[in-house]
Image: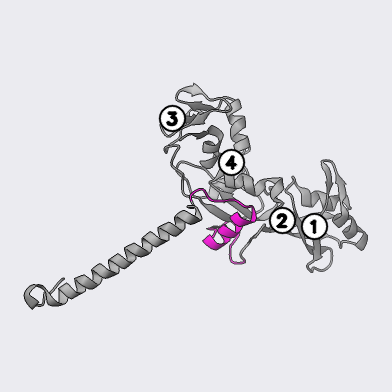
Amino acid sequence: MDEKLQKVLARFGLGSRRLMEEWIAAGRVVVNGQSAKLGDRVAAQDKIAVDGEALRIPSWVRPRLRVLRYHKPAGELTTRNDPEGRPTVFDRLPRLRGSRWIAVGRLDYNTEGLLLLTNDGDLANALMHPRAGIEREYAVRVMGAVSPEQQTSLLRGVALEDGEARFVTLQEAGGEGLNRWYHVTLAEGRNREVRRLFEAVGLTVSRLIRVRYGVVEMPRLLKTGYFDELPDEEREALFTSVQWVNPATPPPDKAERGTGASESRKNNSRREARQGALRGRTGQGGRRVVRD
């Protein structure tokens, strides 16, 4: 069985399928000693190398799917390498073998809060794709209060250099004096969109924290600079929200058959245990057998 090369690379967590296609076109990928081409397919026996480095595990083995929730502090970049040597979110993450972490979207250098990371390129792509329409919620501290006229503009739409943008919701969240807090939601993830929207109506954002990405929220007890593994229940809810199916999950009919087989094995084990217990009590010829 063979698969598209870009799909295999994305599955390893090297990036989205689109990015992998760009790498292939740029000549960064080699299969069996030959430069790969768009449209190539690979099978279990093929040897794949990226930037001269062979993949460390066979391409037909899928690494365990992982999704992390990271509380990004201000002053970290959502990039793998920085020419200026500034810290990145990847500096704090556990090392992976055979794959790498992919940030689901980005947070600006001075933006804090929830950042999701996964080692599956297909999942990352599904979570970032515009068609998913995933809501991002932010807590925003603004210098000055938002007037009714400004709020109307921000909800109806404001012209930015890359097209019109708007908040889905905008709610006041307290504050005194110059600084006021608001909670806003967006259904897209353009660069610096929250800051640019407020700037467009004459307001300056002094602090910005992402508190929710789709169905995943930032736990109150997750400290800045720390991460946790997304619990199974939240992970499944996240998959469902973008209609993404984990390839490692067996189809329902197989799962049901597996459950039946498992129950059969359990029943056999119980039967054997009962028979063993009887043999232990009586032994051969009616003598009691002591077992350690």
Mark 3 and mark 2: Cα distance apart in space = 40 Å
Is residue 83 visible from the viewing direction of this image? no
Identify the mark nearer the N-term, 3 or 4. Answer: 3
Q: Is residue 163 magenta?
A: no
Please tell me whether residue 34 is drawn above or below residue 205 in the rendered image: above
Q: Is residue 171 left or right of residue 283?
A: right
Disc 1 versus disc 3: distance between alpha carbons? 48 Å
Up-down relation of residue 35 to residue 17 (above or below): above
Please state the horizontal and vertical placement of residue 216, each as a whole percent of the image: 63, 60
CA–CA distance in space, label 3 to label 4:
28 Å
Residue 244, placed above or below residue 151: above
**Residue 62 makes an appearance in the image:** yes
Task: Find disc 3 in the rendering and name its residue.
Answer: 46
Marks 4 and 1: which is nearer the front?
1
Res 80 label: 4
- Secondary-structure class at tag 4: loop
Give the spatial CA distance, label 4 vs label 2: 25 Å
Look at label 4 and name its amino acid: Arg
Residue drawn at x 52%, y 60% as measured from the top left: 232
Q: Amino acid at mark 2?
A: Glu
- The residue stretch that appears in magenta: 220-248
N-terminal label among 3 and 2 = 3
| 123 or 212: nearer the viewer | 123
Residue at 60% from the left image edge and 40% from the top image edge: 16
Can you give x and y, in whole percent of width and height, for residue 104 in the image? Answer: 63, 48
| Callout 3 amino acid | Asp
Q: Residues within 10 Å of mark 4 (few under 14, many from 20)?
A: few
Q: Judge the density around disc 1: few (<14), some (14-19), many (≥20) Cα neighbours within 10 Å.
A: some
Question: For residue 168, which numbered disc appears in the image?
Answer: 1
Asked whether the residues under the numbered discs 4 and 2 touch, taking CB atoms below 8 Å apart as contact, a structural biologist would say: no
Q: Which mark is residue 135?
A: 2
